[in-house]
Structures are given as structure tokens and as C-alpha cells.
Image: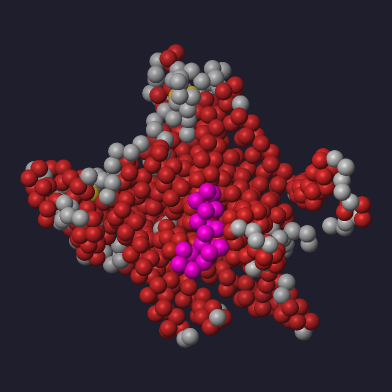
Amino acid sequence: MGLREYIIRRLILLIPVMLGVVILIFVISQLIPPTARVALFVSENPKQMKPEVVQYYIHYYGLDQPVWVQFYEWLKQVMQGNFGYSENFQEVVLDGLIKRAPATMEIVIYTAPLILLIGIWMGVNSAVRRDKPFDHFSRVLSILGTSLPSFFFGVVLSAIFIAQLRWVSSGRLSYLLGGQYYSMLKDGTWHVYTGLLTVDSLLNGKLNYFVDAIVHLILPVTVLVFIQTATMVRVTRSSMLEALSKQYIVAARAKGLSQREVIYKHARRNALIPVVTIAGLIVGGMMTGLVITETVFGFPGLGNWAASAAQHFDFPVVIAYAIFSAVVFVLANLIVDVLYAYIDPRIRLG
Amino acid sequence: MESKPQAAKLPKSRFENFKRVMQPRIKEIRFIFKRIRESPLSIAGLILVSYNLIIALFAPVLAPPKLYNPYLIPRDPELGFKIDPSPPSPTHPFGTTRLSIDLYYGCIWGTRFAFQIGLEIIGATLVIGLVLGMLAGYYGGLIDEIIMRFTDIILAFPGLILAMAFVATLSRAGWNTLDAALLSIILIGWPGYVRLIRGEVLRVKTEDYIEAAKASGATDLRIMLRHILPNSIYSLIVVVTLDFGGIVLTAAALSFLGLGAPPGYADWGKLIYDSISYAGQGFKYWWVYTVPGIFIVLFVLGWNLLGDALRDVLDPLYRRK
């Protein structure tokens, strides 16, 4: 089986899973009475509608029809990107999602490489120095990473650095620059290229905004990296230990290669193959972590959006976010699997 | 095990018979304890878990309940139901949080509450996991396919996010948030157990002793309960131990998002949720977030350390070098 066939096969296998995902969400949403469930379809606040209008929409979107008709109607809307109206944020759900995605993206693009680099570095080194101080240190750190709740860590960091020392403020920018940023957005002097402040500020030639945006990313990125790296270290370490015990390492040593070459050229390359598989898991962990981290640091991204909606039982937003994250998670896993099959031909041939 | 010739003879009493039958198991348990004693991290885990267990068991003694529902934290009328927290004092050793809620009481009963929700959720997921995992692994075919596709769907979501959507929707439909939160953690937890148990069943199923049991006419149920289950029990123990802290952490995270226990409940996540606004005032009210936070960390750390230690001891890949 070639790589292309493998990808096609995996894509076809995705269809039932994604269908299952929407069916599950649909089943859960059925618990809500139709008069409230209208919020999943309309583009204005159903609470401010006249009862006749609500009844009209109930009829229009088939909420008085049998379940399968309802599912079909809803799926049609979801496929068109219509997730309804958020009563909490007073906006169409899809607009809210698009508006907040760059802030989250900004955290992710700084967090993911750090998790990879630190995780692999610590994992490889603690395997090489097994049962030495470095190994114990990284083991303690990774146990702490899994035991320390991100919300507690975040609250303590925000109490220290935001509230007590006042080194940074919550949000994406400090108050002064944030205000100027919004006025510049309005009069068009700030051109939005990507929505990522650290990129746009450079493209707009405003270095002080770049520094400010980076400073505001430090705390959320720290929390996410600390919590997520633990898994990475653990998997890399055990995979590296296994690789080091293989016959080809003995052969490489017998050949007279230096310790450095044995570790980095022979062992590490093979050890990193299984590490690829947990990258998907890290993506899922990050999406969960973002909900907590963004909430703690008042970062106006998707996680904060979903958490605040959930607190107000604003189900259209929460449902949209759940579907969105399932799609991202599944796609991430697909990419990981394809990468894995590409790196290790045994997978697709076996 | 080396068998002595007299062991084959019929024993004199039932007790001796019992001793003879149990001997390999006693030896195994002795071996486990020996390995645990050798590792300082395991001892730390064991101490932390027992410390939490003692607090949970003796909660009614350590903090006598005053209200009908002991998990509701009594408020101190002497503080005049003050809104802002009061610092630690002789009557309130850990201070109070918002609305004069006593943190000492909240943390002590919070430990008991953590054990309660942990056991409830583990119990439910374990039962679902055992039944479905064994069905899927043992019978295979269509049953296996259906069950595994269900787990795929749940596992397509990042756990906490599905739980969040579930709780928010259920609460909107009029459910109690605490019940919804517990149910949602069960919903996201069972697929992991099904996969684990299915894998164990598949691993054990092809062993000769299963064939032997089948040949001697054992029923499917007997094979599953008497032969497959005991042989997968160690990996189950490890996973349950590692999971216990994680489950309490997820419940606390939901409470922290305002989706768990109701206000005034002895729940660590809820206590930290109440303290977010005070964290915005720096160190002035340091105790409101530090105290419940330390309780959570010690609890989860204990279970993680113990789980790690048990994995080193029980996992056939790592043990007996």
C-alpha cells in the first residue's frame, strides 16, 4: 500500500467518526426544549423575539419534525458554518469564533515548538543519563507537571506577576497600547495581515507592540508548556531507553563510534519515531489547557470564549467549540498518522 | 515457584489448604512491598495517599458538620457574613474565603468529597469498561466493531471540552450542575477503560490456559471472570491509580470553570473558582487560593507517585530486571 492510498483510506475512515461526533452533539442538544434550541439556528437573539417569531423559526428549521429531519436540518446548517446565535456575547457564533481564533493561534504557535524542543531534549537526556541527577530532576518535574492543576498554577502566577508585581496585565496587550491598538484598528492605520499581534506588529513596523505582545504571551505559554511537556518527556524517555537497548546500538558502539554519534545519530532518530504519535495527544491537551489558561489570564481567545459561554450555559457557543475542537483534534491525529506512516514504512506496509 | 514434594500431599486443615493456595499471591504481595520500600518516590506517594485517606475518613471528627448536608460549608455568623475573606485565625485556621466560608472545613470535607467523586466515577467507568471491553475483546466481530467505533467518537474530542459542552447543555436543560459534571466525566472516561480491557483480553485470550479452560467445558462468563480478569488485574490497578488523581483534577477543573459543585460546597475547584477575583488583588488574600490549591496538589501528586511506583513494580515490562 502506497502512502497515497494510506492517506485516502484514513480520510474515508474519518467520515464515520465525524458523523458520530455530530450525532453525539445532536443527541445532547435534544435535551433542550425547542424554544431555546432555536438559538442553534437563528442569527439574532431568540430571547428578544416575539413568541410568534420563535414559533415561526421552530417550524422553519423543522424543530417540530421527527428527530431525523431535525438532525438533517441541523447538519445542513452546521455544514454551512451556521452555529446559531450566542446570547451571552450577543453575536453570531461563527463571527465570534473567527474573531477570537487569532489570539488562540498566537499562543499555540509559541507553545507547540517549545513543548517539542524542551520535551525531546529532556526526554533524550534523562534516558542517556538514566538514574543520574538529571534523570531524577526531569522525573520530578514531569510528575509535578501532571499533578499541578493548570488553573491553580495560573491563578498563583497571575496573583504574583499581574496583581502583586504588576509586571504585565491580563489580556493580549497592556491597557495603554491596547486602547491605541483598537483606535488604530478603527481608523485603519493598523493593517491586519494575520490577526497575530506578534506578526502584525512587525509588519506594521511597530516594535513596541511586538515587545508588549510577547511579554503578555509569557505567562499563558509558561503554564501550557509546563503542563504539557510532562507527557512528552515521559514518552521520549521510555522510547529512548528502548532504542538504547537495541542490538544496532551495540553494533554502532562495537564499530567504534563516539558516544555522541551513537546517541544522536543512531538512537535518537529511532527513538523519535514513536514520539510523533503523541503529538496528536498534545494537541488535544493543549485545546483543553487553553480553556483554563486563557480564562485565568483573561486572554481573549477561543478557550476563554468557550469557558465564559459555558458558565452562562450559552450552549450554541459551547457546541460550536466542541465541534471545532473535535475537527482540529481529528485532523491533527490524521496528520500525525500520515507523518508516522511516512517516517516509518512498516506502518503502512504492515 | 519451587514446589516441595510434601506440598502435593493433601493438607490437614482448611487453614493450611488456604495457606498453600494463597502462597504464590502472598509471595507476590511481599515482592511488591519490597520494591515499594526501595523507592523513595513510592513511599512519598503512599504517605500522601494515606494522609488524604485519613483526612477523608476522619472528616466528621476533624471538622464536625453543623448543617444537614455535611458537604455544605457552614458560614460563621460571628464574622457577620462578611463578604471579603478573613485571614487565618484560631477559630479559622486556614482563614475564610468569600462570604465567611471557612476554608479549613472546606478543605477537610473537600478531601472526602474528592474521594467520593473519584470512587463514584472510577466505579462507573470501570463497570462500563469491564463489560464492554470484555464483550469487544472476547467475542470480536460485529460487537467489537460497534463498541470500538463508539469509543472512537468519544475519543475524537479533547476530554474536558466535551465534558464542558455536555455540562453546559445539560444545565441549560435544567439539570443540577454537579450531577451533570459527574456524568460528563464518566462519559469522557469510559472509552479509555474499554480499550485497555479489550487489549488485555486480546493479549490473554490466545494463551494456552484459556484453551485448556475452554476444552474442559468452562462457560464464557467463567473464563472471563476467573481466567482473563485476574490476569489483567495488575494493569488495571496501575491505570486506576494513575487515573484517580486525573479524575479529581478534571472535576476540579470543571468546578473552576463554574460547571461543578454549587456555591458553598466543600469542593476544591469551587473554592479556587471563588478566589479568582481575590487573586486579582495580589498577596492581600493569599490564603484563599493557596490553601485549596495545596490540598489539590498533594492529593493528585500522591496518586500520581503511587501510580508511577505501581507501574514500575507491576508492569511485566519493567519489573524483575
- Res A125 visible: no
Q: Which residues are magenta?
A: B126-145
Q: Position of residue A49 (x, y in %)?
A: 11, 44
Residue nearest the observer in this picture, B270 or B138: B138
Residue for point 32% across, 60% down: A22
The residue that appears at 67% across and 78% down in the rendered structure is A266
B81 or B267, which is in the foreground? B267
- Specify the principal SS of the magenta part: helix
Q: Nearer the viewer, residue A10 or A306?
A: A10
Q: Is A129 placed left or right of A78 in the picture?
A: right
The residue positioned farthest toward the bottom in the image shown:
A2
Q: Quadrant of residue A345?
A: bottom right
Compared with A349, A120 (above or below) is above
Q: Quadrant of residue B150?
A: bottom left
Q: Dividing the image into 4 quarters, which one contains the N terminus of chain B? A: bottom right
Q: Quadrant of the C terminus of chain B?
A: bottom right
Q: Position of residue A314 (x, y in %)?
A: 27, 46
Is residue A36 found left or right of A59 in the rendered image? right
Image coordinates of residue A24 in percent, x first then y, are 34, 56
Relative to B169, does residue A186 appear above or below in the rendering? below
Snapshot quadrant of residue A248: bottom right
- The residue depicted at 88 percent of the width and 56 percent of the height is B3
**Residue at the image point whose x is 49% and y is 35% from the top:** B268
Is B137 included in the stretch rendered in magenta?
yes
User: Is A239 left or right of B127, judged from the image as shown?
Assistant: right
Residue A344 among those drawn in magenta: no
